[in-house]
Image (cartoon, helix red, strand yellow):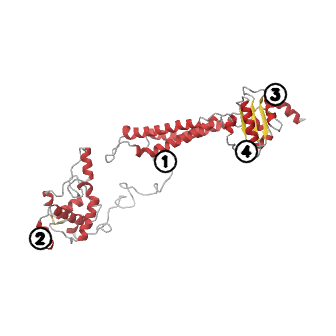
Amino acid sequence: MAESVAIQNASERPLHGVLAEFDDVDSISAAAREVRDAGYTRFDVYSPFPIHGIERHMGLRPTKLPWIVLVCGLSGTSLALFFQWWTNAVDYPFKISGKPLFGIPANIPVTFEFTVLLSAFAAFFGMLILNRLPEHHRPVFESSRFRRATDDGFFLAIEADDPQFDAAKTRALLQKLSRHPVELCHDSGQSAAMPVWIRSALVAVGALALLPLAAVVWARASDTTRPPIHIVQDMDSQQRFRAQVANQVFADGRAMRPDPAGTVAWGELRTDATLASGKRGDAFLETFPVPVTDAVIARGRERFAVYCTPCHGQSGYGDGLVALRAAELQEQNWVQPSSLHDPLVRARPVGQIFDTIRNGVRTMPAYGRQMSVEDSWAITAYVRALQRSQNATIDDVPAAERAKLGVQ
């Protein structure tokens, strides 16, 4: 009795379409061609696995999805290049060593990533929209036989809203193509739309997702004396006294403790004041306080190439790469490095050259914190050798070498 009531209720519901079952790939492919040739356009094929070429049998037109992906990908490329150009070359130009404000190679990584991002979004959401997904219920699900569509069954359903649909003729056509009974599918009365509770949940999640963004905007647009929220502490909030603040632990109330008298940094103990300063009293040394050997000259040459060559050049004429680039850019505040072969520089005692290296002079920075005293004397020795090489006389050539050359 209950079964007859269910059948009667189903027959009273609107007709959704006609469903036919087939045994294998060949039979359903042939049926799809027949239905296509009969002029039907609103039908679908269901199978447990993809059937190669089924879209041709059904007469489906090529999908527009590749074009959507192409347009979104090109949009991502254009937007990425535009915003990088705008931020780096227009809105906030930042010069770095004379490099161009905008260059294609340097902006390829971000451009590539943004292109892939928009292309992926287009492929994913475009597929859902073109296929009218998500669809939570279909009337064919009401058929108990249709459950085999995920196992070993092949089905073809023609929808009632097809222009060619006629209940009797359509059923007869499918019955001719299938050896199984053809089934009429009625609307279940359930809405295919997304349930209200899901829509409400999505709206609530979307609203909650906007809260962090709103908090960031509020924080950037307002002033506060409170410290920012620090989720990952990284030992930044440990208990400690900061410099220049009061500390009641010590009698003088200072948190930043002065060095004890006589404190010397590790490896910086200098008992020879002449060696460390390049002076004897107030006068610069005229001679080297260390032995000048081939090893010292070689060390000085290597350190000179690291610290001095960028501005003074390899030969010491003040034509290093930094100086040449500054002259090319016509930097207004740039001061040309002195030539080490200038008579005034050559006349300076070795102690003054050492002092210049350690403490700087005029626009030349001090390098005392970047190199040891020994390396500073090594560079001084190499500078003297470099000056002598560019201003040598025949008397500077050893007698044995002059004899080999036949020069007196």
The disc at residue 229 is 1
Q: Earlier in the sequence, mark 3 or mark 4?
A: 4
Q: Residue flagged by tag 4: what amino acid is it?
A: Pro
Q: Residue flagged by tag 2: what amino acid is it?
A: Gly
The residue pinned by badge 3 equals 168
Q: Residue flagged by tag 3: what amino acid is it?
A: Ala
Q: Earlier in the sequence, mark 3 or mark 1?
A: 3
The answer to whether residue 222 is visible is no
Instruction: Determine whether the residue tagged by mark 3 lies in a helix, strand or loop.
Output: helix
Q: Earlier in the sequence, mark 1 or mark 4?
A: 4
Q: Nearer the viewer, mark 4 or mark 2?
A: 2
Mark 1 and mark 4: Cα distance apart in space: 53 Å
Q: Earlier in the sequence, mark 1 or mark 2?
A: 1
Mark 1 and mark 2: Cα distance apart in space: 83 Å
Q: CB atoms at circles 4 and 2 under 8 Å apart? A: no
The answer to whether residue 49 is visible is yes
Mark 3 and mark 4: Cα distance apart in space: 28 Å
Instruction: Determine whether the residue tagged by mark 1 lies in a helix, strand or loop.
Output: loop
Mark 3 and mark 1: Cα distance apart in space: 71 Å
Mark 2 burial class by Cα count in 10 Å: few <14, some 14-19, many 20+: few
The residue pinned by badge 4 equals 48
Which quarter of the image is occupied by the C terminus? bottom left
